[in-house]
Amino acid sequence: MTLTIEREMPLTRMRRFVRWSPHLLVITGILALGYVGFTLLDARLFQASAKRSLETQIHREEERQQPQVKSAVKTGAVLGRVDIPRLGISVAVLQGTSSRMLRLGAGHIERTALPGEIGNSGIAGHRDTFFRELKDIQLNDEIQIHTATGLFRYKVDWMRVVEPSDTTVLEPSSEESTVTLVTCYPFYFVGSAPKRFVVRAHQY
């Protein structure tokens, strides 16, 4: 009798697990979708706020009589906005590339030039959100970068797929202003993507 009861107990637990597993899967799915929805909403609201902040910065610069001495850009500050008209990309650029910065917008890669300056300005973004449409970028496409100090226009020179460890694409340019956009690759890869998709453009 005891042996029979001991055998029935695991079977009873198994039946309960099988009976409840569909409910657990549904709950897990709802929570996952809720998290994704919250993340996307948070990013969209932040983008609207960041773009308003940029407009305020632009108006302040226009009202100043004398040019101001440039100060270091604080991590998380709104640096500007990247627009690629043909692709419909318009995203605020923050200073820094932490996971939070890239969740909310594109991130200016530290120790690279600021947009409009002589040198190579690196900007990173997620392939599954703000930089998704980079998959359709073409040679000579125009990239616009708006900052408080002006509008800078760039023309795409090349696109390249590189290893994550390849930092040569961020090497500075000593004669002209360039911008380098970086995102993960392949665009539809599930999980942590093994490559990086790089776009280089020069100011004109």
Image: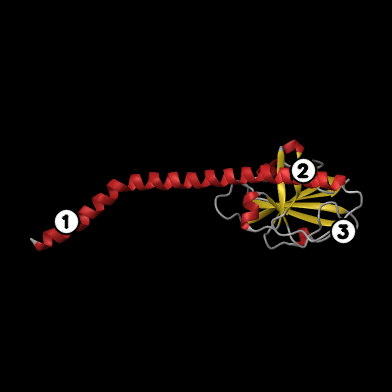
User: In the structure shown, which secondary structural element does the residue marked by tag 3 occupy?
Assistant: loop
Circle nearer the N terminus (1, 3): 1
Q: Position of residue 115 (x, y in %)?
A: 81, 52
Give the image quarter of residue 56.
Answer: top right
Q: What residue is pinned by disc 1?
A: 8
Q: Is residue 161 left or right of residue 200?
A: left
Q: Position of residue 174 (x, y in %)?
A: 89, 60
Q: Position of residue 170 (x, y in %)?
A: 77, 59
- Against 187, is 68 above or below? below
Q: Earlier in the sequence, mark 2 or mark 3?
A: 2
Residue denoted by label 3: 69
> Where the C terminus falls, by quadrant?
top right
Question: What's the distance in space between the residues labelled 2 and 3, CA to CA?
Answer: 20 Å
- Residue 129 visible in the current orientation: no
Q: Which residue is mark 2?
A: 55
- Tell me the residue at 82%/41% (across/down): 140
61 or 120, which is in the foreground? Answer: 61
The residue type indicated by label 1 comes to: Glu
